[in-house]
Image: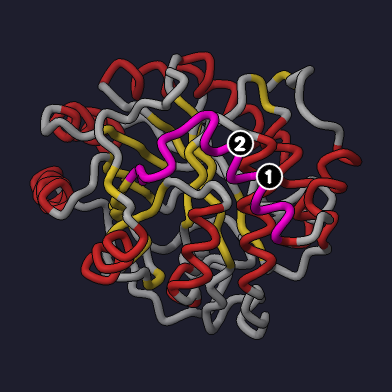
């Protein structure tokens, strides 16, 4: 993808990140309020539609065939089951339904054709639709857009410098090519990364800078904290400190003012107070439900209690304050 000319330099973004935490949160909160309703939170739900046996070697992922985890492999699930999950997600307060398949890349054929039909049906329920299927070519991206897919998720995961320490079976350039195909199709881009994978602080800034310099910037930016799973190369990695996550959220908000910044994986390790600070710093999207693909998530009831305490409400209509 092309590089935005108005984005902060990496050095300038590092200076933003390095501010005293409360100064950084205050600045991010101001940016957030200039572009969004600060009380509105976009709520999504995520379903694994094909689990395990992925040929990629991502060091964080229990679905990789390279790792010896206890994850049970599950084939591509039927359209009726996906639709039932989508209806349940909508009833539980989600306005976006995300579907993830553990593929290296989408492959043309019966399963892809069936998925296209499923996207159209989920869209017909009145939900925004999102998918993550691995790498796409231009034709596949166009077919997904024509079927009604609103967002395509394809994360950069970490900084360009740290990337080959996490993944060797796919390059940064491969990821950028898929993002370009998604953008060219007319779909919106969901793209973020994972923190706490042994990276340096400069790598966290590098990830945010890489996201912010995509042109146009991603409409949705999931910020994940590593969930260390037994059997993966990162199983002994200590949890990400809560203040590091707040810093990343705030810096992402300043760098990408119009994006939905989503608190994603790892939220179960956060106290209510830490989550509150993330929302103040510009996070305005979460996943509802007790599972994210294969890792645990906070339950819907917990989120509803927290939203009530903080005066937050689910976003309606998916629009920004500034349009």
Give the quadrant of residue 61. Answer: bottom right
Magenta span of residues: 22-42
Residue 86 lies within the magenta run: no
- The secondary structure that dominates the magenta segment is helix
What's the distance in space between the residues labelled 2 and 1, CA to CA? 6 Å
Q: Quadrant of the C terminus?
A: top left
Locate residue 180, reporting x and y percent.
59, 22
| Above or below 70: residue 85 | above
Q: What SS does tag 1 mark?
A: helix
Residue for point 74% across, 37% down: 210
> What's the mark number on residue 27?
1
| Above or below 85: residue 218 | above
C-beta proximity under 8 Å, tags 2 and 1: yes
Residue for point 69% across, 58% down: 247
Locate residue 88, reporting x and y percent.
11, 53
Assess disc 1: are there few (<14), some (14-19) or many (≥20) residues with their C-alpha within 10 Å of its C-alpha.
some
Q: What SS does tag 2 mark?
A: helix
Locate residue 302, reporting x and y percent.
28, 71
Residue 28 lies within the magenta run: yes
Q: Nearer the viewer, residue 263 or 145?
A: 263
Q: Is residue 94 left or right of residue 2?
A: left
Q: Which residue is mark 2?
A: 31
Q: Is residue 79 left or right of residue 163?
A: left
Residue for point 66% across, 82% down: 238
Residue for point 26% across, 28% down: 317
Locate residue 299, reporting x and y percent.
27, 70
């Amino acid at each position: 993808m092309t590089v935005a000319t108005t984005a902060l330099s990496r050095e300038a973004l590092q200076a933003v990140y390095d501010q005293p935490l409360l100064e950084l949160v205050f600045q991010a909160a101001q940016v957030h309020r200039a572009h969004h309703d600060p009380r509105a939170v976009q709520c999504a739900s995520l379903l694994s539609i094909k689990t395990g046996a992925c040929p990629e070697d991502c060091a964080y992922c229990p679905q990789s065939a390279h790792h010896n985890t206890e994850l049970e492999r599950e084939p591509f699930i039927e359209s009726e089951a996906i639709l039932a999950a989508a209806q349940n997600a909508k009833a539980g307060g989600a306005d976006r339904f995300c579907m993830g398949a553990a593929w290296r890349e989408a492959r043309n054929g019966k399963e892809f054709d069936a998925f296209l039909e499923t996207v159209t049906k989920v869209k017909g329920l009145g939900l925004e639709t999102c998918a993550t299927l691995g790498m796409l070519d231009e034709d596949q991206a166009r077919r997904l857009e024509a079927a009604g897919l609103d967002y395509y998720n394809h994360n950069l995961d970490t900084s360009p410098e740290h990337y080959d320490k996490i993944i060797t079976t796919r390059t940064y350039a491969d990821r950028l090519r898929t993002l370009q195909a998604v953008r060219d199709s007319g779909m919106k881009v969901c793209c973020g990364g994972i923190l706490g994978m042994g990276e340096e602080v400069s790598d966290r800034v590098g990830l945010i800078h890489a996201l912010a310099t995509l042109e146009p910037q991603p409409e949705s930016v999931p910020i994940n904290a590593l969930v260390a799973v037994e059997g993966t190369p990162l199983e002994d990695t200590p949890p990400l400190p809560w203040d590091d996550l707040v810093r990343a959220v705030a810096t992402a908000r300043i760098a990408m003012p119009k994006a939905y910044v989503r608190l994603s994986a790892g939220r179960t390790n956060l106290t209510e107070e830490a989550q509150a600070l993330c929302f103040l710093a510009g996070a305005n999207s979460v996943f509802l439900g007790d599972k994210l693909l294969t890792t645990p998530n906070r339950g819907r009831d917990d989120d509803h209690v927290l939203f009530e305490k903080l005066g937050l409400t689910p976003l309606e209509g998916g629009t920004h304050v500034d349009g």
